[in-house]
Image (cartoon, rainbow, N blue to C red):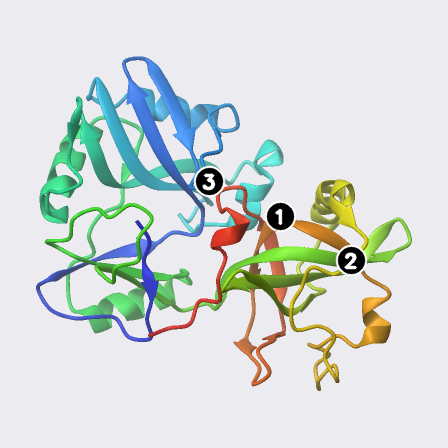
């Protein structure tokens, strides 16, 4: 189930609030001692996160389906998407945690049609004594909650209707999210080679089946992320541009567009890779301004990447 992006946090007793974690969305399926960790695009991540598999194996239920997020936390409990990307070389001050926020099935019983309040109460019982963390409700005045989340430099908040049923693959508006840092996923459609590496990547999003160009991303890379991203991009090369809306007539004040001359310098790619990108704003021409690369997302299918605009 997906959350709609909104400008303002809804208020009232009909809503519960949770932290918007900056991690990988994962469904955990437990059957006896067997545990599988699956992403939204049904990729199996069990072998990549053995400590999370072990934590889920310790919950009290014989069989269960959990919905949650794998997060890399530092010593102060602050999430880092970059640290999650480099989990094979995680610094000693980061640890991986699975935050579960929903329970979809318990011992063979489908719970999706039950109210969220009921599902979360059952979830708390199932997680008791295990190493899986409950994504707890944030109680109190919404204005104070927002102030606290911003003060902790966290990404945002999710608000969910207490009586909401679980609607797989849907953005019904029963769940909404507010972002305090502008970021979302984008599809990588090309890169500009530079020596034995690259200087920038070209990213976009889908709109009515077309891959729309959103801009170039030059910042946010380090030696490790450049090396890993280039390794992932090189096998996907294609001769023609896959973006709609190119070329643009100008590059704009901050160089967000792409002229025909600049297009000739790009190595185009099959739209298979999804990256998390933070940025300051959208320009009036529909391009990203001051974009930074955060990492690849293996938990998001490219065809589901859209331009998220708050309602």
Mark 1 or 2, which is nearer the eye?
2
Residue at which label 1 appears: 273
Residue 44 drawn above or below residue 18: above
Residue at which label 2 appears: 240
SS assignment at label 3 = loop
Residue 157 quadrant: bottom left
SS assignment at label 1 = strand
Distance between the Cα atoms at labels 3 and 1? 12 Å
Query: At which x and y percent is residue 282?
Result: 54, 77
Residue at which label 3 appears: 41
Query: At which x and y percent is residue 43?
Result: 49, 33
First in residue order: circle 1 vs circle 2:
2
Residue at image point 16% right, 69% down = 141
Residue at image point 30% right, 53% down = 170
Residue at image point 30% right, 39% down = 67
Of the pair 224 and 193, the residue shown nearer to us: 193
Residue 131 quadrant: top left
Tell me if 177 is positioned left or right of 199 in this view. Answer: left
Query: At which x and y percent is residue 64?
Result: 24, 26
Residue 138 quadrant: bottom left
Residue 36 drawn above or below residue 301: above
SS assignment at label 2 = loop
Residue at image point 91% right, 53% down = 195
Of the pair 114 and 147, the residue shown nearer to us: 114
């Amino acid at each position: 189930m997906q959350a709609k992006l909104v400008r303002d946090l809804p208020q009232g007793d009909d809503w519960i609030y949770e932290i918007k974690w900056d991690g990988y969305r994962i469904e955990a399926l437990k059957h006896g001692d067997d545990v599988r960790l699956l992403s939204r695009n049904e990729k199996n991540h069990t072998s990549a996160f053995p400590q999370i598999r072990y934590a889920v194996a310790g919950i009290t239920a014989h069989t269960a389906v959990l919905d949650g997020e794998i997060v890399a936390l530092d010593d102060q409990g602050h999430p880092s998407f970059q640290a999650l990307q480099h989990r094979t070389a995680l610094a000693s001050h980061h640890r991986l945690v699975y935050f579960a926020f929903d329970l979809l099935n318990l011992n063979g019983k489908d719970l999706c049609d039950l109210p969220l309040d009921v599902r979360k109460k059952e979830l708390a019982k199932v997680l008791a004594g295990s190493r899986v963390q409950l994504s707890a409700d944030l109680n109190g005045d919404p204005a104070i909650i927002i102030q606290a989340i911003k003060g902790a430099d966290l990404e945002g908040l999710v608000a969910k209707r207490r009586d909401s049923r679980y609607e797989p693959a849907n953005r019904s508006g029963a769940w909404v999210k507010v972002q305090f840092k502008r970021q979302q996923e984008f599809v990588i459609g090309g890169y500009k080679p530079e020596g034995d590496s690259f200087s920038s990547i070209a990213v976009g999003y889908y709109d009515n089946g077309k891959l729309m160009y959103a801009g170039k991303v030059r910042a946010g890379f380090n030696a490790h992320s450049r090396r890993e991203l280039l390794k992932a991009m090189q096998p996907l090369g294609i001769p023609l541009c896959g973006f709609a809306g190119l070329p643009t007539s100008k590059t704009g004040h901050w160089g967000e567009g792409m002229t025909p001359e600049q297009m000739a310098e790009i190595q185009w790619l099959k739209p298979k890779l999804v990256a998390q990108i933070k940025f300051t704003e959208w320009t009036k021409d529909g391009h990203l301004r001051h974009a930074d690369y955060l990492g690849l997302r293996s938990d998001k299918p490219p065809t589901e990447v859209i331009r998220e605009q708050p309602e």
